[in-house]
Image: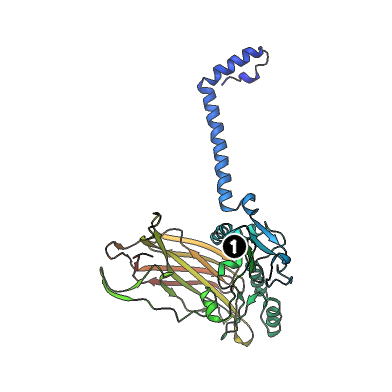
Amino acid sequence: MKNFLLSTNKPLSSIGSRLVRAILTSEFYIISTLFFCLIFHSCSEDESITTKFPSKTNTENIQVVKPQSLKGSAVDGQEYGNATALRFRNNVVFQETLSLLESMTREEREIWNKQFANFKSMDQIYIQAMEEAENLTFTEQEYNNYKKKYSQILYFPQYKDDFGAYVSVRQRNLAYISNANGCYMIGDEVINAPRIENYTQLQESGQGLYENTNLPTHSVSASALRYSWMEEFGINDIYAGSMESIWYVGGRDNGKRIKFRVSRLIVPQPTNLVGRPYLTGAETKLEVQIAFRKKGFLGAWYNYSSKTSTTIKFSINNVESFEKEGYSYHNWTSPKYLETDSKDPIAKKVYYGCLLVDLTTDYRGIGVIKWFTSLPPVAVRYTGY
């Protein structure tokens, strides 16, 4: 290709005329096309980053405010972020931020939180407590000191042999934006998130060592296609069937234990038609929950931060691996929907066949644990909202 821009021994008018001719040639067209592609690619990358993490303009709608801004709130200026709280410009900003944080990993939320100096969320304090607990053997003195430090922020149930510490707001995702006292602001309004007061509320928040056995039972219907007896679930259910392992303990009972649960997570498929909120189907994804504890004084169990590395095989040729660290439980949801067995548009039901699950986890505390189970066939109704 000719380098016409460097031909300075020609008169300016001659250079100009050659430039005009070059614009009309394919040579300049190729250069401009490549230049445009580079710019477009750069913009596309910037857009994806902006979507994942709020831009400066978006975070300007969220402020860190001082205690005097929290009229009538419970903020008392103590340690762990009580002296500050997040103030959202309006409810739209609040809801969008909450949805964004729910979609993030723990590491991504930590990056997001660093944008707000002098603020520490309840979730960040919980992570800190779990990391401290990892280094404790939970003697009576250690437990009393630990509880004294966090009892005004976290919930300590001391229910049966559950002596763990938990996020104390009843809606778990509010811990991402609440301060140590569960406070945040929307506009000029101070919001005090409802706090957990008993073990049932702890279970309803998705936490706790013991499961809630008072949940409503599901109907069982006969003759669903080729299935003789099948458990049925509806769109108001969170899961369409779950299987849970026993507690696995370490060799010679080293004071650590771990258990697993696999479930079909129901994902309703609503229409996009305005004013017509009905469902066109009910997809499911595979969800894996891993919980672990360590034993302390009184023979009770305490939650703490640890690491798990898991490989899971399910359906046909589906193999996934994930690694989690922090918290006292690790959750994973399959990126793709599970395959349906069949669909009955007249009965408005989706049928799922038996799902075999083969799970191997390397747990920092015991070692490698293998667990094999199967989720029985189910039907999911999608008759509407």
In this rendered view, identify the residue nearer to me: 198 or 159.
198
Q: Nearer the viewer, residue 84 or 205?
A: 84
Residue shown at the point (63%, 55%) measured from the top left: 61
Percent position of residue 46, x then y: 58, 45
Taking the spot 32% from the left edge, 76% from the top edge, the residue there is: 220
In the image: residue 40, left or right of residue 153? left
Q: Position of residue 335 (x, y in %)?
A: 46, 58
Q: Residue at x 37, y 58 (%)?
A: 276
| Side (left or right) of 40 relative to 223 | right
Q: Position of residue 232 (x, y in %)?
A: 34, 72
Q: Amino acid at mark 1?
A: Arg
Q: Tell me: residue 356, above or below residue 277.
A: below
Q: Quarter of the image holding residue 188?
A: bottom right
Give the colour scheme shown. rainbow
Quadrant of the snapshot with the C terminus? bottom left
Write down the quadrant of residue 235 in the picture: bottom left
Image mark count? 1
| Residue 271 to residue 156: above or below | above
Q: Quadrant of residue 45?
A: top right
**Element class at badge 1:** helix
Give percent across and percent down for residue 150.
68, 76
Q: Which residue is mark 1?
A: 106
The residue nearer to you, when weighing 215 against 65, is 65
Viewer-nearest residue: 57 or 7: 57
Q: Where does the N terminus fall, quadrant-wise?
A: top right
